[in-house]
Image (cartoon, helix red, strand yellow):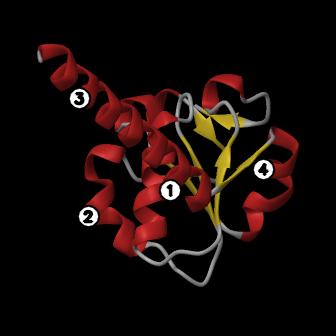
């Protein structure tokens, strides 16, 4: 009987992971660095890393809205303009994209691989 319970819990967990993955894929488009560079000047460039990470170096022109305060600060973003998100490795930016999507944002883009793979200009 215990195996049935354990199997049910595992199945629910796997379903939850799949649901989150599909929701995040639907919420935003992941762009290569070249695609990201080609578009981010036409939109809102948002770094969702924490303040200390942002101060250590960020993409030139980025605005810092740390993930720890994102739910409150995302109201400062315009829904009529594209949003370009990045974090260190694309985990936090995926969560931010989901939040924006649920809030009614339509054009949401993420930097593939995050800031750790960025080779473009940065500001320190």
Q: Is residue 37 left or right of residue 43?
A: right
Q: Who comes first in sequence, dot 1 or dot 2?
A: 2
Q: Position of residue 111 (x, y in %)?
A: 68, 43
Q: Of helix, strand and loop, which one carries label 4? A: helix
**Above/below status of 104 relative to 19:** below
Q: Of helix, strand and loop, which one carries label 1? A: helix
Q: Which residue is mark 4?
A: 36
- In this view, the mark in front (1 or 3): 3
Q: Nearer the viewer, residue 1 or 86?
A: 1
Could you tell me if the residues under marks 3 and 2 are in contact, i.e. CB atoms within 8 Å?
no
- In this view, the mark in front (3 or 2): 3
Q: Which residue is mark 2?
A: 72
Location of the N terminus by quadrant is top left
Q: Residues within 10 Å of mark 4 (few under 14, many from 20)?
A: some
- In this view, the mark in front (1 or 4): 1
Marks 1 and 4, how far apart at CA:
15 Å
Residue at the (79%, 34%) spot, across then down: 120
| Displayed quadrant of residue 42 | bottom right
Q: Who comes first in sequence, dot 1 or dot 3?
A: 3
Q: Residues within 10 Å of mark 2 (few under 14, many from 20)?
A: few
Q: Which residue is mark 1?
A: 97
Q: Which residue is mark 3?
A: 9
**Above/below status of 5 relative to 41:** above
Q: Position of residue 43 (x, y in %)?
A: 68, 68
Q: Who comes first in sequence, dot 3 or dot 2?
A: 3
């Amino acid at each position: 009987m215990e195996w049935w319970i354990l199997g049910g819990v595992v199945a629910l967990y796997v379903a939850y992971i799949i649901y989150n993955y599909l929701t995040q894929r639907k919420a935003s488009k992941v762009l290569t660095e070249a695609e990201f560079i080609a578009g981010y000047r036409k939109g809102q460039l948002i770094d969702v890393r924490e303040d200390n990470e942002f101060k250590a170096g960020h993409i030139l022109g980025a605005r810092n809205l740390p993930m720890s305060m994102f739910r409150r600060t995302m109201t400062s973003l315009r829904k009529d303009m594209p949003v370009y998100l990045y974090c260190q490795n694309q985990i936090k930016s995926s969560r931010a994209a989901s939040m924006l999507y649920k809030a009614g944002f339509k054009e949401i883009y993420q930097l593939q691989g995050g800031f750790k793979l960025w080779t473009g200009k940065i500001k320190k």
